[in-house]
Image (cartoon, rainbow, N blue to C red):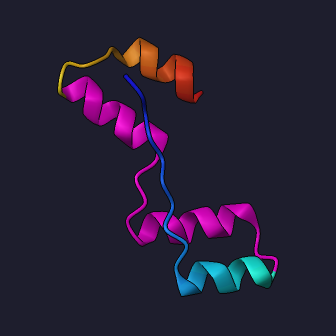
Amino acid sequence: MALHEVMTVTEQIERMVTEHASSEEVARVARDQGMITLRTDGLAKVRMGLTSIAEVLRVVV
């Protein structure tokens, strides 16, 4: 079973990257625009009974 984190590069994110915004700023905007993080995907899979919290923490921490 895999965890996924996919960021769609919107015009705003592309502009931020070309303007040398910090990775933290880009990540915040991406999350605000609906990006699902590895942690969020992992916790969803814990709720579905597909994995354990210990396994998610091992992978994302």
Q: Is residue 6 left or right of residue 25?
A: left
Residue 49: x %, y % from top left: 19, 19
Overall secondary structure of the magenta stretch? helix
Tell me which corner region of the image, top left, top right, bottom left or bottom right, holds residue 47.
Answer: top left
Tell me which corner region of the image, top left, top right, bottom left or bottom right, holds residue 35.
Answer: bottom left
| Quarter placement of the N terminus | top left
Q: Is 58 above or below relative to 33?
A: above
Q: Is residue 32 left or right of residue 24?
A: left
Residue 32: x %, y % from top left: 43, 70
Residue ID at (78%, 82%): 18
On whether residue 44 falls in the magenta region, the answer is yes
Q: In the orientation shown, which residue stands out farthest toward the front?
A: 1
Tell me which corner region of the image, top left, top right, bottom left or bottom right, holds residue 9.
Answer: bottom right
Residue ID at (42%, 72%): 33
Front in this rendered view, residue 4 or 34: 4
Residue ID at (40%, 52%): 36
Residue 52: x %, y % from top left: 33, 14
On whether residue 35 falls in the magenta region, the answer is yes
Residue ID at (55%, 29%): 60
All told, the count of numbered labels is: 0
Q: In the orientation shown, which residue stands out farthest toward the left?
A: 48
Q: In the orientation shown, which residue stands out farthest toward the right?
A: 20
Query: Which region of the structure is painted magenta?
Result: 20-47
Q: Is 26 above or below relative to 20?
A: above
| Quarter placement of the C terminus | top right
Q: Is 50 above or below relative to 10?
A: above
Front in this rendered view, residue 28 or 4: 4
